[in-house]
Amino acid sequence: MPKRVIVEGEKKLILDDFFKVEEVHLSFEKFDGSMSPVVRRLNFERGDSVAAVLHQKQRDVVILVNQFRYPAYDKGPGWLTEVVAGMIDKGEHPEAAMRREILEETGYVVENLVHIADFYVSPGGSSERIFLYCAEISGLDPAGKGGGLASENEDIQLVELSTGEAFARLERGEIQDAKTIIALMWLRTRLVSGVS
């Protein structure tokens, strides 16, 4: 596989807000071993994040969340049903971030976290990487309030579904969030194969 990348000059920050956008000029090694011409690339720097589908084995239900997502508003409903997700704070381990986000958004305390995968969301334009988990919960009721953080203007509604209904919504195309689709497909495969 090609490995060489030559960055021309300094990266330029063209947006420095809640999100950041970097501009860079570079050349990269092509598959034939030659170097590409200098090209301009942008990187939407969002940071790394975590996500988890919550599964309550005893009742065979999953806990998802509904919340408003402005980027999905013009092309769809705006309110999406998703797995619990959030950003990893600087210096925070992904598993610790996941446990924190689950408590903030749902009020549940995690019994066990099973790692599913790490993946890039949209590597053609963003460096964001997601650490995806299945969170096993044992309590029938949340230990905390959930609903998200008022300081972040979060308004999160819990959605409890039997695994059968969650998988049916997946099949009907009602789940439109990629990380949620991946997590539910992983959970369905795991349950069908009898892995506990």
Image (cartoon, rainbow, N blue to C red):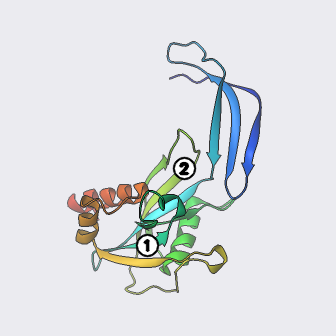
Q: Position of residue 173 (x, y in %)?
A: 29, 59
Decide: is 43 above or below 195.
above
SS at badge 1: strand
Residue sitting at 67 percent across and 54 percent down? 19
Q: Is residue 56 above or below residue 179?
A: below
User: Residue 179: horizontal and vertical position, in percent?
Assistant: 43, 56
SS of the residue at dot 2?
strand
Q: Position of residue 50 (x, y in %)?
A: 53, 60
Query: In the image as oriented, which residue stretches furthest toward the right?
Result: 9
For marks 1 and 2 on the same chain, the one whose residue lies earlier in the sequence: 1
Disc 1 marks a residue whose amino acid type is Val
Which of these two is toward me, 149 or 49? Answer: 149
Q: Position of residue 196 (x, y in %)?
A: 29, 65
Residue 104 visible within the image: yes
Q: Image point 70% across, 28% down: which residue?
A: 25
Drawn side of residue 58 relative to residue 20, left or right: left
Instruction: Identify the residue position indicated by label 2 in the image.
Output: 129
Q: CA distance from mark 1 to mark 2?
A: 21 Å
Location of mark 1 (residue): 65
Amino acid at pointer 2: Arg
Observer-side mark, 1 or 2, equals 1
